[in-house]
């Protein structure tokens, strides 16, 4: 409630950018988080055990440049 009141006060003082910043502190924009998660899901590779049990996701910049198709035609495997 305090940050919202600060935002309103700053806005009425003509400090529009500071007002917006104060609001973002209590209501952050989720867009950067969505972009990050989307990039991980599209460019990440599942890290698995030798039995193909998934244990995490890895980001490999060079490998992520391979096969950017909406209809994938390749599967990565590591021996």
Image: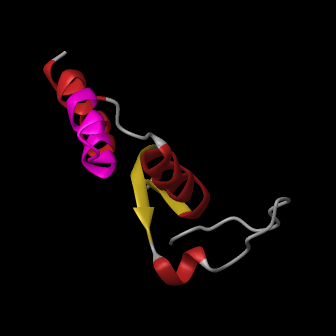
**Quarter of the image with the N terminus in it:** top left
Residue in the image at 26% along x and 47% along y: 15
In the image, is residue 10 above or below residue 74?
Answer: above
Can residue 36 be seen?
yes
Residue in the image at 48% along x and 79% along y: 61
Specify the principal SS of the magenta part.
helix
In the image, is residue 55 above or below residue 8?
Answer: below
Residue in the image at 49% along x and 46% along y: 31
Image-based side of 78 in relation to 6, left or right: right
> Among all residues in the image, which is located at the extreme front?
13
Image-based side of 28 in relation to 45, left or right: left
Which quarter of the picture shows residue 65?
bottom right
The magenta segment: 8-19
Q: In this view of the protein, which residue sits in the foreground, 12 or 67?
A: 12
Can residue 49 be seen?
no
Residue 1 within the segment the image draws in magenta:
no
């Amino acid at each position: 409630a305090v940050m919202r009141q600060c935002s309103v006060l700053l806005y009425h003082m003509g400090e529009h950018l500071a007002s917006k910043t104060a609001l973002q502190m209590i209501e952050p924009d989720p867009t950067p988080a969505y972009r990050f998660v989307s990039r991980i899901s599209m460019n990440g590779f599942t890290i698995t055990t030798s039995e193909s049990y998934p244990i995490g996701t890895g980001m490999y910049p060079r490998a992520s440049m391979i096969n950017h198709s909406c209809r994938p035609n390749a599967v990565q495997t590591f021996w």
